[in-house]
Image (spheres, rainbow, N blue to C red):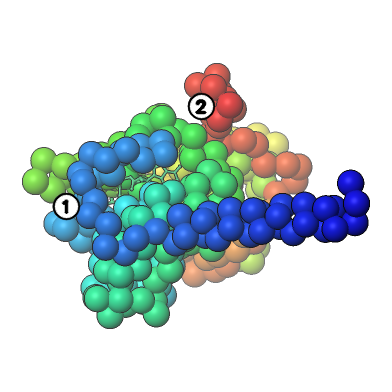
Amino acid sequence: MNLLARSLAVSLISFASLSFTAQAQTAQQGNPNFKPQVGQAGKDVIWVPTPDSLVNRMLRMAQTTEKDFVVDLGSGDGKINIAAARDFKARGLGIEYNPDMVAVSRRMAREAGVDKMVEFRQGDIFKTEFFDATVVTMYLLPQLNLRLRPILLDRMKPGTRLVAHAFTMGDWEPDETSVVENRYGYLWIVPANASGNWRVNVAERAVGNFTMDLNQTYQRVSGNARLNADIEANLIDPELRGDQFKFALRAVDGRVLTYTGTVAGNRITGTVTGNGLNSTFTAERSGAPRQIHSGTDANSRAMNN
Ligand SMILES: C[S@@+](CC[C@H](N)C(=O)[O-])C[C@H]1O[C@@H](n2cnc3c(N)ncnc32)[C@H](O)[C@@H]1O
């Protein structure tokens, strides 16, 4: 091939690839005047919008405020993010695979006057990072919730609120359920991992230091404390909500004291109260925490493949 022919061929290839990129960009941008049809195909699930009354209830279950960053996984026409911004002043991100729906949601956000507060991004929920969310909303399918479950439990900050329309998360029991006009909304609060062996030091020396061994499945914690060489006792009514951990324990002298603390990595700090006592405690975890969910069970593994 002579020089002219070669440079012509190169120009043709670059032109072809440029126009291909331009076409792809147009497709990516989507049509803001697209008319969505309820039931239209989506990548992993069809589009059906959540009714306004349940959107409002889900955002209330999550106790959404202006401090929150709400991520809707599969955001459709953007109505959940738009309601969160308009009614709760919360910023947000909607992740939606269909570029036309992304364009529609951007237009609707502009019309609602909340386009500065919400972003809509074209993408696959399984390939997009959303770890800065404080509230995650979903109206997907049971198997998609299960596929998301290990990501939500392991990667989201403790205390992140997850709200789902219609579908649960396998054996991870919701913290709260609401039914609005016969439709179910579920709330889960991502728990800290409090499992393992802890050494607890109580500032009030009379109470005595102790060790405790905690088991945890999702947000449910149980465990025993070894108070001294002779006495082991169970934790009474342990309760974990996000990073807030509360339990009672009968001390060696017989008093039932309440421990209320914050779990941060391998440390818990908080207060010890009851029977006129008002003291503080710290706990340090020795060894590694245990896995708190069945994220690698056969079911989830199959879903992730
Ligand atoms: C049942 S609709 C829910 C829409 C909105 N969240 C609501 O509750 O009104 C599910 C949406 O997820 C989108 N979707 C399906 N698979 C997806 C994927 N892998 N990544 C991003 N979006 C997806 C669909 O296009 C559809 O708009």
Give residue 237's quadrant in the image: top left
The residue at label 1 has a CB less than 8 Å from ligand 1: no
Judge by depth and name the residue closer to the eye, 138 or 223.
Answer: 138
User: Which amino acid does the dot numbered 2 rest on?
Assistant: Met
Image location of residue 68, percent across then percent down? 41, 70
Residue 128 - label: none
Residue located 39% across and 80% down the image: 116
Res. 303 mark: 2
Crowd rating for badge 2 (residues with CA inside 10 Å; few <14, some 14–19, many 20+): few
Closer to the camera, 54 or 209? 54
Q: Position of residue 175 (x, y in %)?
A: 34, 45
Image quadrant in which the C terminus is located: top right
- Residue 284: quadrant of the picture: bottom right
SS for tag 1? Answer: loop
Rendered residue at 28%/80% (across/down): 113
Give the side of residue 155 with respect to residue 188, left or right. Answer: right
Q: In this view, does 12 lie above or below 126?
A: below
Q: Does ligand 1 reach within 8 Å of label 2's beta carbon?
A: no
The residues bearing labels 2 and 1 have C-alpha atoms spaced at a distance of 28 Å
Task: Find residue 265 and report its image quarter.
Answer: bottom right
Mark 1 lies on residue: 51
Which residue is most to the left? Answer: 181
Task: Identify which residue is drawn at 50% across, 47% down.
Answer: 124
Extreme residue toward the right, this view: 2
Residue kind at label 1, given as amino acid type: Pro
Residue 213 visible here: no
Residue pictured at 41% horizontal, 54% vertical? 99
Find numbered disc 2 in the image and state the secondary structure of the residue it sits on. Answer: helix
> Which x, y percent locates residue 134?
45, 62
Location of residue 87 in the rendering, given as x and y in whole percent from the top left corner: 23, 73
Query: Is residue 273 visible to us here?
Result: yes
